[in-house]
Image (cartoon, rainbow, N blue to C red):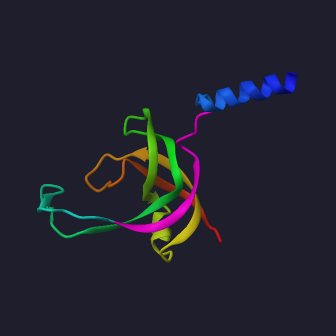
Amino acid sequence: MNKIFYTSVLLFLMSANVFAQNPYNTKLEGLVIADTLEFEDEQELSDTDFVNEPIFYRVLQLNQPKNLFAVDVDGNIEKFSDISKIQFAGGKYQQIYDLPIPTKIRVTCELFIAHTAYHYTDVLCDVKDFKRLK
């Protein structure tokens, strides 16, 4: 009887996000793919940069959408729902750009919230480490 009770409590706590994912050390799996941002009209990215050509960048396409926690520039943590793609930025991201497309990986990230015009997904991955999977 105690096993059933403790199992029920554990399942409840997990469903209530009491055991929240740590945005500073998050492990995720998925496919590295190329994504594209296209502009209908010329867009201003900064005081001197104007773009009207597509921008290509690498993202992690998650195996299934996830609810994730990410850190903003002030250190506050926010929850994001149904995230399916995460842009790579910082850390070892250049090594991921050298991988063939698509490549299945397991990556350890510090997740942070987009805060510049060059951040194309709501949540980004500062790559701490990654491993190619078969």
With 16 as the anchor, is 54 left or right in this view? left
Number of numbered discs present? 0
Farthest-out residue, right: 1
Magenta region: which residues?
Answer: 19-35
Whether 70 is drawn above or below 92: the answer is above
Residue visible at 73% across and 24% down in the picture: 9
**Residue 123 percent across, percent down from the top left:** 41, 48
Please tell me which residue lies in front, 56 or 12: 12
Instruction: Determine whether 91 is above or below 18 in the image.
Output: below
Instruction: Say whether residue 4 is left or right of residue 9.
Output: right
**Residue 28 covered by magenta stretch:** yes
Find residue 65 and report its horizontal and vertical position in percent. Answer: 50, 49
In x, y percent, where is residue 50?
A: 13, 63
Above or below residue 7? Residue 24 is below
Q: The C terminus lies in which quarter of the figure?
A: bottom right
The residue at the point 45 percent across, 68 percent down is 33
Q: Residue at x 45, y 71 (%)?
A: 97
Q: Nearer the viewer, residue 3 or 93?
A: 3
Q: Quadrant of residue 3?
A: top right
Displayed quadrant of residue 47: bottom left
Q: Residue furthest toward the bottom? A: 100
At 46% from the left and 44% from the top, the residue drawn is 82
- Where's the N terminus, which quadrant? top right
Can you give x and y, in whole percent of width and height, for residue 12 in the image? Answer: 66, 27
